[in-house]
Amino acid sequence: MDLEASLRRAIRGGELFLVFQPQVRISDGRLIGVEALVRWRHPHDGLILPDRFLPIAEETGLIVALGDWVLYEACSQIRRWRTKLNLTIPIAVNVSGAQFRDGQLPAKVSRALDANGLRGPELEVEVTESTLIDDVPGAVATLQALKERGVQVALDDFGTGYSSLSYLHRFPIDKLKIDRSFIQDLTGQGADSTVPRAVIGLGHNLGLSVIAEGVETEAQLAVLRELRCESYQGFLYSRPVTADELEPLLTRQP
Ligand code: G
Ligand code: G
Ligand code: MN
Ligand code: NA
Protein backbone atom coordinates (compact mmCIF):
# COMPACT_ATOMS: atom_id res chain seq x y z
CA MET A 1 0.00 0.00 0.00
CA ASP A 2 1.29 3.49 -0.72
CA LEU A 3 2.41 5.70 2.10
CA GLU A 4 -0.33 8.29 1.59
CA ALA A 5 -3.14 5.75 2.01
CA SER A 6 -1.49 4.15 5.01
CA LEU A 7 -0.83 7.54 6.62
CA ARG A 8 -4.49 8.46 6.15
CA ARG A 9 -5.41 5.21 7.88
CA ALA A 10 -2.83 5.83 10.61
CA ILE A 11 -4.31 9.23 11.51
CA ARG A 12 -7.84 7.81 11.73
CA GLY A 13 -6.94 4.44 13.15
CA GLY A 14 -4.89 5.16 16.23
CA GLU A 15 -1.43 4.30 14.88
CA LEU A 16 0.03 7.70 15.79
CA PHE A 17 1.26 8.44 19.29
CA LEU A 18 3.10 11.24 21.04
CA VAL A 19 6.43 11.24 22.81
CA PHE A 20 7.41 14.06 25.13
CA GLN A 21 10.73 15.82 25.66
CA PRO A 22 11.13 17.67 28.99
CA GLN A 23 11.80 21.40 29.05
CA VAL A 24 13.87 22.38 32.07
CA ARG A 25 14.29 25.72 33.87
CA ILE A 26 18.01 26.46 34.09
CA SER A 27 17.87 28.39 37.39
CA ASP A 28 16.60 25.47 39.49
CA GLY A 29 16.60 22.41 37.20
CA ARG A 30 12.82 21.97 37.38
CA LEU A 31 10.88 20.33 34.58
CA ILE A 32 8.49 23.10 33.56
CA GLY A 33 6.92 21.70 30.40
CA VAL A 34 7.28 19.18 27.59
CA GLU A 35 7.40 19.31 23.79
CA ALA A 36 5.14 16.77 22.09
CA LEU A 37 6.66 14.96 19.09
CA VAL A 38 4.59 12.69 16.88
CA ARG A 39 5.49 9.07 16.13
CA TRP A 40 3.88 6.42 13.90
CA ARG A 41 3.65 2.81 14.99
CA HIS A 42 3.09 1.05 11.67
CA PRO A 43 1.40 -2.38 12.02
CA HIS A 44 3.96 -4.05 9.72
CA ASP A 45 6.96 -1.72 9.44
CA GLY A 46 7.21 -0.78 13.13
CA LEU A 47 8.21 2.67 14.34
CA ILE A 48 8.34 5.38 11.66
CA LEU A 49 9.91 8.76 12.51
CA PRO A 50 8.51 12.14 11.41
CA ASP A 51 11.39 12.79 9.04
CA ARG A 52 9.89 10.04 6.86
CA PHE A 53 6.19 10.78 7.06
CA LEU A 54 5.92 14.55 7.62
CA PRO A 55 7.12 15.37 4.08
CA ILE A 56 4.38 13.08 2.69
CA ALA A 57 1.85 14.62 5.06
CA GLU A 58 2.87 18.08 3.79
CA GLU A 59 2.66 17.11 0.11
CA THR A 60 -0.75 15.47 0.44
CA GLY A 61 -2.34 18.01 2.77
CA LEU A 62 -2.78 15.30 5.42
CA ILE A 63 -0.60 17.49 7.65
CA VAL A 64 -3.69 19.46 8.75
CA ALA A 65 -5.56 16.34 9.95
CA LEU A 66 -2.36 15.08 11.56
CA GLY A 67 -1.85 18.43 13.29
CA ASP A 68 -5.43 18.40 14.54
CA TRP A 69 -4.86 14.94 16.01
CA VAL A 70 -1.66 16.10 17.75
CA LEU A 71 -3.42 19.15 19.20
CA TYR A 72 -6.33 17.14 20.65
CA GLU A 73 -4.11 14.34 21.90
CA ALA A 74 -1.75 16.79 23.64
CA CYS A 75 -4.68 18.50 25.39
CA SER A 76 -6.14 15.12 26.42
CA GLN A 77 -2.75 14.16 27.85
CA ILE A 78 -2.54 17.32 29.96
CA ARG A 79 -5.97 16.40 31.40
CA ARG A 80 -4.96 12.76 32.03
CA TRP A 81 -1.80 13.78 33.90
CA ARG A 82 -3.78 16.30 35.94
CA THR A 83 -6.33 13.65 36.92
CA LYS A 84 -3.78 10.92 37.61
CA LEU A 85 -0.87 12.85 39.14
CA ASN A 86 -2.58 16.03 40.34
CA LEU A 87 -0.02 18.01 38.30
CA THR A 88 -0.48 20.53 35.53
CA ILE A 89 2.20 20.03 32.93
CA PRO A 90 2.13 22.44 29.96
CA ILE A 91 2.66 20.89 26.52
CA ALA A 92 4.21 22.54 23.44
CA VAL A 93 2.98 21.30 20.06
CA ASN A 94 4.58 21.89 16.66
CA VAL A 95 2.20 23.57 14.24
CA SER A 96 2.93 23.32 10.51
CA GLY A 97 2.60 26.21 8.10
CA ALA A 98 -0.52 24.72 6.50
CA GLN A 99 -2.25 24.29 9.87
CA PHE A 100 -1.26 27.77 11.00
CA ARG A 101 -2.56 29.36 7.82
CA ASP A 102 -5.80 27.42 7.42
CA GLY A 103 -7.65 30.16 9.35
CA GLN A 104 -9.20 27.80 11.88
CA LEU A 105 -6.28 27.28 14.22
CA PRO A 106 -7.48 29.60 17.03
CA ALA A 107 -10.96 28.01 16.95
CA LYS A 108 -9.51 24.48 16.96
CA VAL A 109 -7.19 25.36 19.83
CA SER A 110 -10.10 26.79 21.79
CA ARG A 111 -12.19 23.66 21.26
CA ALA A 112 -9.31 21.37 22.28
CA LEU A 113 -8.75 23.40 25.45
CA ASP A 114 -12.46 23.60 26.32
CA ALA A 115 -13.07 19.90 25.67
CA ASN A 116 -10.41 19.09 28.28
CA GLY A 117 -11.14 21.86 30.78
CA LEU A 118 -7.76 23.54 30.20
CA ARG A 119 -6.63 27.14 30.51
CA GLY A 120 -4.78 28.76 27.60
CA PRO A 121 -1.31 28.95 29.22
CA GLU A 122 -1.25 25.16 29.59
CA LEU A 123 -0.73 24.91 25.83
CA GLU A 124 2.13 26.28 23.76
CA VAL A 125 2.25 26.44 19.98
CA GLU A 126 5.61 26.22 18.17
CA VAL A 127 5.85 27.82 14.76
CA THR A 128 8.82 28.58 12.53
CA GLU A 129 9.73 31.97 11.12
CA SER A 130 8.97 30.82 7.58
CA THR A 131 5.39 30.05 8.66
CA LEU A 132 4.94 33.64 9.83
CA ILE A 133 6.61 35.73 7.14
CA ASP A 134 4.59 34.41 4.16
CA ASP A 135 1.70 36.63 5.20
CA VAL A 136 2.67 38.95 8.02
CA PRO A 137 -0.73 40.62 8.65
CA GLY A 138 -2.48 37.22 8.58
CA ALA A 139 0.09 35.75 10.96
CA VAL A 140 -0.24 38.68 13.36
CA ALA A 141 -4.04 38.22 13.42
CA THR A 142 -3.75 34.48 14.14
CA LEU A 143 -1.13 35.06 16.85
CA GLN A 144 -3.32 37.77 18.37
CA ALA A 145 -6.28 35.37 18.54
CA LEU A 146 -4.12 32.75 20.26
CA LYS A 147 -2.84 35.38 22.68
CA GLU A 148 -6.38 36.41 23.57
CA ARG A 149 -7.01 32.80 24.57
CA GLY A 150 -3.83 32.88 26.68
CA VAL A 151 -1.99 30.26 24.58
CA GLN A 152 1.81 30.63 24.56
CA VAL A 153 3.67 30.90 21.26
CA ALA A 154 7.30 29.92 20.65
CA LEU A 155 9.35 30.59 17.52
CA ASP A 156 10.99 27.22 16.72
CA ASP A 157 14.39 26.62 15.08
CA PHE A 158 15.19 30.30 15.59
CA GLY A 159 18.22 31.54 13.69
CA THR A 160 18.01 29.08 10.82
CA GLY A 161 15.25 30.73 8.81
CA TYR A 162 14.87 34.08 7.12
CA SER A 163 15.77 35.93 10.32
CA SER A 164 13.03 38.44 9.74
CA LEU A 165 14.34 40.80 12.40
CA SER A 166 12.36 43.68 10.94
CA TYR A 167 9.10 41.80 11.62
CA LEU A 168 9.95 40.09 14.89
CA HIS A 169 8.75 42.92 17.14
CA ARG A 170 5.36 42.90 15.38
CA PHE A 171 4.60 39.29 16.24
CA PRO A 172 2.87 38.81 19.60
CA ILE A 173 4.95 35.80 20.69
CA ASP A 174 6.33 34.68 24.05
CA LYS A 175 9.46 32.66 23.46
CA LEU A 176 12.40 32.06 21.12
CA LYS A 177 13.81 28.53 20.67
CA ILE A 178 17.49 28.57 19.71
CA ASP A 179 18.06 25.91 17.05
CA ARG A 180 20.16 22.98 18.18
CA SER A 181 22.78 23.53 15.44
CA PHE A 182 23.96 26.62 17.36
CA ILE A 183 24.03 24.77 20.68
CA GLN A 184 26.38 22.17 19.20
CA ASP A 185 28.83 25.02 18.44
CA LEU A 186 28.93 26.22 22.06
CA THR A 187 31.77 24.01 23.26
CA GLY A 188 34.66 21.92 21.98
CA GLN A 189 37.01 22.80 19.13
CA GLY A 190 36.30 26.17 17.56
CA ALA A 191 33.64 26.89 20.19
CA ASP A 192 31.44 29.79 19.15
CA SER A 193 28.71 31.35 21.27
CA THR A 194 27.99 34.25 18.92
CA VAL A 195 24.54 33.18 17.76
CA PRO A 196 23.12 31.98 21.12
CA ARG A 197 24.43 35.20 22.75
CA ALA A 198 22.77 37.32 20.06
CA VAL A 199 19.47 35.39 20.18
CA ILE A 200 19.28 35.57 23.98
CA GLY A 201 20.07 39.31 23.93
CA LEU A 202 17.50 39.94 21.18
CA GLY A 203 14.86 37.86 22.95
CA HIS A 204 15.35 39.60 26.26
CA ASN A 205 15.29 43.05 24.65
CA LEU A 206 11.94 42.13 23.11
CA GLY A 207 10.64 40.85 26.46
CA LEU A 208 10.70 37.22 25.35
CA SER A 209 11.85 34.11 27.17
CA VAL A 210 14.55 32.01 25.45
CA ILE A 211 14.85 28.21 25.38
CA ALA A 212 17.79 26.27 23.94
CA GLU A 213 17.23 22.94 22.19
CA GLY A 214 19.60 20.05 21.64
CA VAL A 215 21.58 20.53 24.87
CA GLU A 216 23.71 17.40 25.24
CA THR A 217 26.48 18.34 27.70
CA GLU A 218 26.98 20.04 31.07
CA ALA A 219 29.49 22.35 29.36
CA GLN A 220 26.83 23.59 26.92
CA LEU A 221 24.42 24.10 29.81
CA ALA A 222 27.05 26.11 31.73
CA VAL A 223 27.47 28.51 28.81
CA LEU A 224 23.69 28.94 28.51
CA ARG A 225 23.42 29.66 32.25
CA GLU A 226 26.17 32.27 31.89
CA LEU A 227 24.23 33.85 29.01
CA ARG A 228 21.04 33.97 31.16
CA CYS A 229 19.05 31.64 28.92
CA GLU A 230 15.85 30.68 30.81
CA SER A 231 15.38 27.03 29.89
CA TYR A 232 16.58 24.12 27.77
CA GLN A 233 15.69 20.75 26.35
CA GLY A 234 18.01 18.04 25.09
CA PHE A 235 19.50 14.62 25.64
CA LEU A 236 21.42 15.93 28.69
CA TYR A 237 18.15 15.86 30.65
CA SER A 238 16.10 13.39 28.63
CA ARG A 239 15.38 12.09 25.17
CA PRO A 240 11.77 12.32 24.01
CA VAL A 241 9.94 9.62 26.02
CA THR A 242 6.49 8.05 26.10
CA ALA A 243 3.80 9.33 28.46
CA ASP A 244 4.38 6.36 30.78
CA GLU A 245 8.13 6.92 30.82
CA LEU A 246 7.66 10.61 31.61
CA GLU A 247 5.61 10.03 34.78
CA PRO A 248 8.51 9.22 37.13
CA LEU A 249 10.29 12.38 35.91
CA LEU A 250 7.18 14.46 36.65
CA THR A 251 6.69 13.15 40.17
CA ARG A 252 10.41 13.27 41.12
CA GLN A 253 10.98 17.02 40.89
CA PRO A 254 13.59 19.02 42.87
O1 G B 1 12.31 14.09 17.32
P1 G B 1 11.89 14.27 16.08
O2 G B 1 12.49 13.27 15.14
O3 G B 1 10.51 13.99 16.48
O4 G B 1 11.56 15.55 15.21
C1 G B 1 11.82 15.67 13.84
C2 G B 1 11.11 16.87 13.24
O5 G B 1 9.72 16.62 13.16
C3 G B 1 11.28 18.16 14.05
O6 G B 1 11.60 19.22 13.15
C4 G B 1 9.94 18.40 14.63
O7 G B 1 9.65 19.78 14.74
C5 G B 1 9.01 17.71 13.66
N1 G B 1 7.79 17.26 14.36
C6 G B 1 7.73 16.35 15.35
N2 G B 1 6.45 16.21 15.77
C7 G B 1 5.71 17.06 15.04
C8 G B 1 4.30 17.37 15.00
O8 G B 1 3.49 16.87 15.77
N3 G B 1 3.88 18.28 14.08
C9 G B 1 4.77 18.89 13.23
N4 G B 1 4.26 19.78 12.35
N5 G B 1 6.09 18.64 13.24
C10 G B 1 6.56 17.74 14.13
O1 G C 1 12.64 20.88 15.21
P1 G C 1 12.16 20.48 16.56
O2 G C 1 12.83 21.27 17.61
O3 G C 1 10.70 20.55 16.74
O4 G C 1 12.55 18.95 16.76
C1 G C 1 13.15 18.42 17.83
C2 G C 1 14.11 17.37 17.29
O5 G C 1 15.35 17.41 17.99
C3 G C 1 13.63 15.97 17.43
O6 G C 1 14.06 15.24 16.34
C4 G C 1 14.34 15.49 18.70
O7 G C 1 14.42 14.08 18.80
C5 G C 1 15.69 16.13 18.49
N1 G C 1 16.47 16.32 19.71
C6 G C 1 16.00 16.62 20.93
N2 G C 1 17.02 16.76 21.82
C7 G C 1 18.16 16.55 21.13
C8 G C 1 19.55 16.55 21.50
O8 G C 1 19.95 16.81 22.62
N3 G C 1 20.43 16.30 20.49
C9 G C 1 20.05 16.01 19.22
N4 G C 1 21.01 15.75 18.33
N5 G C 1 18.75 16.01 18.84
C10 G C 1 17.81 16.26 19.78
MN1 MN D 1 9.82 22.09 17.98
NA1 NA E 1 13.80 22.89 16.42
Image (cartoon, rainbow, N blue to C red):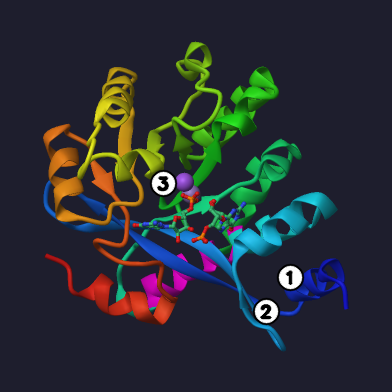
Separation (CA) of disc 2 from disc 3: 29 Å
Q: State how far apart marks 3 and 1 are (Cα).
A: 27 Å
Q: Secondary structure at mark 2?
A: loop
**Residue occupying image coordinates x 63% and y 33%:** 131
Q: Residue at x 39, y 73 (%)?
A: 81
- From what the image shows, is residue 194 above or below residue 219? above
Give the residue furthest to the top: 166
Q: Residues within 10 Å of mark 2 (few under 14, many from 20)?
A: some
What type is the residue that disc 2 sits on? Glu
37 above or below 222? below
> Start and end of the magenta stretch?
71-83
Q: Residue type at mark 3?
A: Pro
For residue 191, which numbered disc appears in the image?
none
Residue 172 point in image, percent of width and height: 48, 25
Q: Give the residue at the far bottom of this rendering.
A: 44
Q: Give amino acid for label 1.
A: Ile
Contact (CB < 8 A) between labels 1 and 2?
yes
Give the spatial CA distance, label 1 vs label 2. 7 Å
Residue 93: give x, y in percent of width and height. Answer: 52, 53
Residue 124 shows in the view: no
Q: Are marks 2 and 3 in contact (CB under 8 Å)?
A: no
Q: Which residue is mark 2?
A: 15
Indicate yes or no whether the magenta region holds residue 76.
Answer: yes
Q: Residue furthest front?
A: 189
Q: Secondary structure at mark 3?
A: helix
250 displayed left or right of 167: left
Checking the image for residue 11, the label placed there is 1
Measured as percent of width and height from the top left, residue 98 is found at 73, 42
Within 8 Å of ligand 1, the CB of disc 1? no
